[in-house]
Every structure is written in C-alpha cells, then in structure tokens.
Image: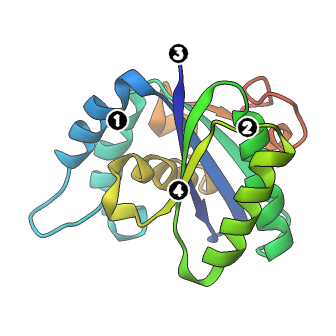
Amino acid sequence: MPIHVFVDETKSRGFLMAAARCPSDDVAVHRKALRGLLLRGQERLHFNHETDARRKQILKVIAGFHLLVDIYPADRDTLAERARCLEAIVRNSAGDAERLIVEREESTHEHDRRTLHDAKYRYGCFDLRWELMVAKLDPLLWVPDAVAWAWTRGRALATAGSAVLSGPGALESARPGSSTVR
C-alpha cells in the first residue's frame, strides 16, 4: 500500500527530523481525528505551546494511529546536516511513498526545495510527489512535531505507546525501522 510521509524538525536539545509514515488509506481519518483535538481559536497543534495534559492527550491519539515514525538526528543545526536528513528521508521513502510533505520553514525554503528535488532524482524516486507546506494546512504534519518533541525529552515510547520509532541508524540504514529504539 502506498504511503504518505510527513516531516517536521525540532531544534530544541539538538537538531533532528521526524518522518511519520502513514498509509494513504488512513490519511483522511487521521486528519479528522487531529483536527478534532484543536481548541477554540487554534489553527494547528504545536507541542511547544501545549500544556502537559494536552500533550498526553495528543500523544495518546497519535499512538492509536500505529504509525512508523523514523527519527533522523543530526550533530548540529546546519544546512549540510539538514540536507543529509532530508536526503535520507527521500532515500528511505523510495519504493513505497507516493507523497512527501515537509513542514515549510521560510529560512530554509529554497535550500530544502533544491535538496528534495536533487534527492528525488538521485534515489530514483521519479513518482514521488513532494511539498513544502505550512503546518496549519495539513494536520498530519503535527504528528512528527509531537513525536520529535517527545523524543528529545525521552518520552517518546512512554507516552506515545504504540508509535514505532527508529533510532540513529535511520540515516545510515537502507531501510529504517530495525534500528535501536530508545
């Protein structure tokens, strides 16, 4: 079954990218569930702005999705490390991903666009459609935000329950998922 991959980053406590892999048949139902978590006046969920009680509630919903979320850590927040993470995400998406959605960051937009374009052809992902999108436009971008936040605080497995996370080997391995889980 084809999948959609949703990518966000965190710069707190180091730099890492999280890539949530969602079967295309589940995208609509998961979006609806996440929109249902919005509070009055909220345009999106963002873990830096949520209370601990809300974070637990959100992670519980996300855990129920049973998604694979790959973690791509970097030594530091540089354009080169960012490109390395994005290239690995494209490489690891080859074959089963039909769509890749990366949260758009204005300061790196042009760099990310070039990196994704080049990686798509380098890894032979000719049918992969990718977009750089602001998070409020697709609720599934909130998943990697939540998991990345939890991961950097050592809470990913304790609070996300069934969310499957791959560790540092995601950058080196041809296929994530079998890496060490923290």
Amino acid of disc 2: Cys
Amino acid of disc 4: Glu
Point 37% across, 22% down: residue: 25
Residue furthest to the bottom in view is 107
Judging by the rendered image, the residue that carries numbered circle 4 is 131
Image quadrant occupied by the C terminus: top right
Label 4, label 1: how far apart the Cα atoms are? 28 Å
Q: Are marks 4 and 1 in contact (CB under 8 Å)?
A: no
- Tell me if residue 43 comes above or below residue 165 in the rendering: below
Label 2, label 3: how far apart the Cα atoms are? 16 Å
**Mark 2 or mark 3, whichever is nearer to me:** 2
- Asked whether residue 10 appears in the rendered view, the answer is yes
- Tell me if residue 112 comes above or below residue 60 in the rendering: below
Label 3, label 1: how far apart the Cα atoms are? 25 Å
Q: Are marks 4 and 2 in contact (CB under 8 Å)?
A: no
Which element type, helix, strand or loop, lies under badge 4?
strand
Near mark 2 (Cα within 10 A), the count class, few <14, some 14-19 or many ≥20, is: some
Amino acid of disc 1: Lys
Query: Which of marks 1 and 2 precedes in the sequence?
Result: 1
Query: Which of marks 1 and 4 precedes in the sequence?
Result: 1
Query: Which of marks 2 and 4 precedes in the sequence?
Result: 2
Judging by the rendered image, the residue that carries numbered circle 2 is 125
Which element type, helix, strand or loop, lies under badge 2?
loop
Near mark 4 (Cα within 10 A), the count class, few <14, some 14-19 or many ≥20, is: some
Judging by the rendered image, the residue that carries numbered circle 3 is 1
Res 16 → quadrant: bottom right
